[in-house]
Amino acid sequence: MKKFFQRLKNHSRIAYFSFWFLLLFYFVSFFADLLAPYHFDHQFRNKPYHPPTKIHFVDSDGNFHIRPFVYNFVIDDPVFRTYKEDYSLRHPLKLFVKGDERRIFFFFKTNRYLFGVDQPAGIFLFGTDTYGRDIFSRILYGGRISLSISLIGVLISFTLGMITGGIAGYFGGITDQILMRFVEILMVFPSFYLMLSLRAMFPLNLSSIQVYLLIVMILSLIGWAGLARIIRGMVLSLKEEDYVLAAKSLGLSNWRILLFHIFPNTFSYTITALTISVPGYIIGEAALSLLGLGIQEPYPSWGNILSSTIGNLRVMGDAPWLLLAGIFIFVVLINFNLLGDALRNVLDPKNW
Amino acid sequence: MKRLICKRLLQIIPMLIGMSFVSFVIIQSSPGDYFAQMKMNPEISPETIEAMKVSFGLDRPFIVQYFFWLKNICKFDFGVSFAYHMPVRTLIKFRLKNTICLAIFSLFLSWVIAVPLAVLAGYKEGTFIDKFFSTLAYISISLPSFFVALLFVYFISKTGVLPLGGTRSIFEMNASSFVIFKDYMRHLLVPGLVLCFVNIGGLFRLMRNNFIETFHTPYVLAAWARGLPTFSVVFKHALKNALNPMFTILGMEIGTLLNGAALTEIISGWPGMGSLILEAVLSHDLYLVMGSLVISGFLLIIGNLIGDILIAFFDPRIRLT
């Protein structure tokens, strides 16, 4: 493992950085309860479409303060929802502030978060949406849903793909024929259309946990086919190797050979493929939520934060900060792509 | 060549059958059926519904129903949409035209831009130009199509240089066909550019790798050794062979293009297949969903077929086997 990291680092510093960056992203969204200044459902009814709060070091009189502070924003024009800063009172930024009680992972309770400011001012790093909910907090919480869906989805579809591909390649014959025809038929459909049709099989209004599971299911059902085909090809050539013959002559069962002798040799490919295919799952989840078929309000996901801007040019013009969720998707995707590319080279036995 | 095409055409048949069967199963297992909404309507008597069920063959077993339906779609009869109250065929025909126009436009544009840039980057491998375009390509493949579309729409709505939504804004009766065409193209530009931007990165990266690979082969070295001019080596020897794998991609490209197009269409308001299937899913219009699904699969199969024929056309090695 240590050697692997060293190689990754030597191969590409950027990819090494991407790895830690992604880990940080997962960490941050995992601990969103502690890090987000507000709960994702906390509504500031008097502050819809609040622009991102500016963090100041210098006050309106030109005096410098070591401790950063914000001003309260008051509505200037209630019709066009324009805000201006109220310079009368400084609200310094505080670490580990007290607030409403939240539950972390359903067990622990906490009422202190990483940072915040005193009421009535608010710290909205990325502004607020129609209901006056803090976009920054929603993005952190949304990351938890978007990133976990993609990770679970990818794991399920890779398990499915490896099992099907392994069986088809190893046993061959009629099993192979049937499985591969099925895979081909699944691959005939453009994934977006298949995704929507599968979604149409279920009622539109489901509870949030049902929707979550449904999205995981749909995404993994779409994703496994391509992998199964490649794994089949690999198993087909690997089963001719001498060590498989050796294992056979030792009297090991087929399953044992497949699981412990053939699969480990496909790992260098599968790990790369896994990294490269995570973006597809993130996009898939975001697309479904964006269209209102995925994660439902009030739960945030990177897709449904963006969804209020679709077909609503006024919202988009008034509150362009809603698009910031897209930047998060982009940043995660580019890091996955960078890491995947580097892994492909690092894990390729040709380059050892 | 002829044999190859015939063989590929024959291979399509089981795929079409499998595809239609999967679509049928998906739709049949959805909650509610075609008559669920009619039963709500007090003006339609239960007897009428029964009679209709018999005429649609819906009282017969599952597999018979499937063949009944298959017979109908062979005549391009996909049933009636109950949200629009018109045949699914009419709806799809109009939308399909738009989607195909969009796909071809962006495909053409992205190839025309990506291939020369990739040759340039591959030829100057490792230089600043190469790194610059490769970074851009990286950004392009990592940007989700819906996000690019949203940014574009935002930009357009701020500046107002191009029209958004729909396919035309000139409704004069006596407008000449050229004016209508120009208007159509102006509307096509927003979704087309978005899609092109999203696609270009992948194409560029692939083409660059292909080109670099061919550029280091012995026959290119031989061409240099014979003292051929740079132009001839790059374009006649290296490029020609580097392009071959790209045609295989062309088929797959149709699939990614359709996926990207769907979201782009929805966001930029282009009335294509993507927005159609979304509306169908949202209004639970099962026959329309099924029709769109079948047509999209059909498009993908045709795309793959065209890719295969093109590669056979350009690569004698495949043509002869």
Image (spheres, coloured by chain):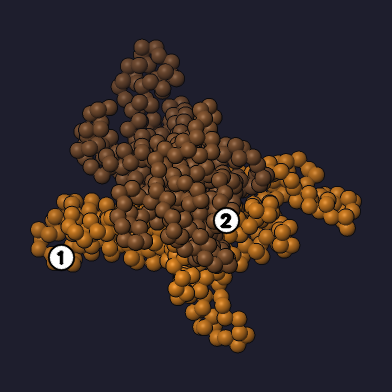
Q: Is residue A243 left or right of residue B105?
A: left
Which chain is orange in the picture? B
Q: Residues within 10 Å of mark 1 (few under 14, many from 20)?
A: few
Does residue A8 appear anywhere in the picture? yes
- B253 or A192, which is in the foreground? A192
**Percent position of residue B313, x then y:** 37, 59
**Percent position of residue A302, x then y:** 49, 48
Instruction: Identify the residue under disc 2.
Output: A46
**Circle nearer the viewer, 2 or 1:** 2
**Percent position of residue A345, x then y:** 26, 40
Q: Residue at x 40, y 43 (%)?
A: A94
- Marks 2 and 1, Cα distance to the nearest angstrom? 68 Å
Q: Residue at x 32, y 16 (%)?
A: A246
Which SS class for mark 2? loop
**Badge 2 amino acid:** Asn
Which chain is brown in the picture? A
Q: Is residue A200 above or below residue B299?
A: above
**Badge 1 amino acid:** Thr
**Percent position of residue A205, x then y:** 67, 45
- A245 or A79, which is in the foreground? A79
Q: Residue at x 27, y 59 (%)?
A: B133
- A82 or B121, which is in the foreground? A82
Instruction: Identify the residue under disc 1.
Output: B230
Q: Chain of mark 1?
A: B
Q: Chain of mark 2?
A: A
Q: Residues within 10 Å of mark 2 (few under 14, many from 20)?
A: few
Which SS class for mark 1? helix
